[in-house]
Image (tube, rainbow, N blue to C red):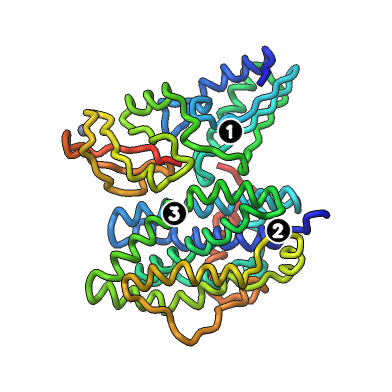
Amino acid sequence: MTTPTIESLLLAMADDELVLGHRNAEWTGHSPILEEDIAFSNIAQDEIGHALIWYTAYEKLAGRSPDQMAFERPWNEFTCARFVTYPKGDFAYTVVRQFFFDVAEEVRLRSFLASSSEVLRSSAAKILKEEAYHRLHTQGLVERLGDATEESRRRMQAGVTAAYAQALGLFEALPDEAVLVAGGVMTPNIELARSWIEAVAPVLRSVSLTPPVALTADAGGRRKKHLPDLEQLVTDLQSVYRLVPGGAW
Amino acid sequence: MNRSLDDERVWEALASVKDPEIPVLSIVDMKIVSRVRASGTAVEVEITPTFAGCPALALMKDEIRKVLTEMGFTDVSVETNFTAPWSTDLLEPDAREKLRSFGIAPPPRPVQIDLGRALAEPVACPYCASAATHLESAFGATLCKQIFYCDACRQSFERFKPL
Ligand SMILES: [Zn+2]
């Protein structure tokens, strides 16, 4: 049996990493304290590195380079989840979003360790090691800020209320998911979503943060149905490159 | 692994290329160079990044090309392998000692099995060897380092992240 084409899966993950990395880089020089400025700048740089891993794997299959994919593609061709496109918002929102993303990435990457695709297996093993540092940090922040003062509680709860349904959008089914699942490449997104819910629940519960009750996943991104936030972000991301296309320095 | 004489010369030359973020170690000490194949005037080098987002990668590739071109190779290819595993467990004892003498606490080993346990181990101060140290910041000035503080000699120092 031949491995089904994994280009759309690689791009969805690469776009998630690049866009969230860019959003987190917006905290550089603007974080509430120096240690978090350093932490979120590092995490942003790591995520952009992971985007490079997935874009490089994509290039081997489809021939378009990481720079072309990141800097030459129109914003409405990206297939990231809407979750990563929202403005950085309150710092508490950023903390919750990054924690939700770290758990989602861990769940997805662990499932890849048994994939029929060699590039998914080996890339996942590499990324998981770096990701462990992110989760240690963001889960620690959730546990401390969720339970610190009246104000930190209120702001963290607002972050959870806003980011929870958005995070479920990370698990929107890919257009060609059935073929990928049948080929043993990936676990169905619906199952990954269930694992994610089970993984974040005890952490939130430990500091009495509660997910919203009635909710629908904030989906659409995988089908390129984006909000203007992404247009603004991609315009910003590509502005220097577009000044001197192909320039090197 | 059998290395030809040509390969040996290339490995030796690459030992002069430093990691710009840790100038006391070469890219060979760091195990960033993962494969070398030289034949005639052509040479292929494969590098395996430590952290995928390492911004020094492009600089190291330029430096490799420069050194090999100066050796007389006219056809130089430098490929990045993003899927090969890299771990701080690969660092040899002498590389760890160089880190320490440079003021960077080396990573514990082995970390492959249990990162949580590796991170819980005490970190000896690279200046005074005291174990009375604590983590100041889980992230540092570069992706591969964390910031610690020594309560004995009252200095902050960097530690290479176990990976
Ligand atoms: Zn000391």
Residue B55 rendering spot, x and y as whole percentages: 50, 42
Which residue position holds label 2?
Answer: A185
The CA span between labels 2 and 3 is 27 Å
Image quadrant occupied by the C terminus of chain A: top right
Q: Is mark 1 within 8 Å of ligand 1?
A: no
Chain letter, disc 1 residue: B
Which residue position holds label 3?
Answer: A43
Q: Note whether residue B75 is visible.
A: yes
Q: Quadrant of residue A235?
A: bottom right
Viewer-proximal residue among B146 and A122: A122
First in residue order: circle 2 vs circle 3: 3
Q: Quadrant of ligand 1?
A: top left
Which residue is depicted at the point 40% across and 69% down?
A: A202
Amino acid on which disc 2 is placed: Val
Q: Are marks 2 and 3 in contact (CB under 8 Å)?
A: no
Name the secondary structure under disc 2. Answer: loop
Do the residues indicated by labels 2 and 3 lie within the same chain of the protein?
yes
Binning the other alpha carbons within 10 Å of mark 2 as few (below 14), some (14 to 19) or many (20 upward) gives many
Name the secondary structure under disc 1. Answer: helix
Residue B56 rendering spot, x and y as whole percentages: 50, 38
Which residue position holds label 1?
Answer: B61
Question: In the visual, does A242 lie left or right of B54?
Answer: right
The CA span between labels 2 and 1 is 33 Å
Which residue is depicted at the point 44% across and 36% down?
A: B110
Name the secondary structure under disc 3. Answer: helix
Residue B41 rendering spot, x and y as whole percentages: 73, 19
Which residue is depicted at the point 44% across and 61% down?
A: A24
Residue B162 rendering spot, x and y as whole percentages: 42, 40
Viewer-proximal residue among A87 and A161: A161
Viewer-proximal residue among A145 and B57: A145
Chain letter, disc 3 residue: A
Q: Are marks 2 and 1 in contact (CB under 8 Å)?
A: no
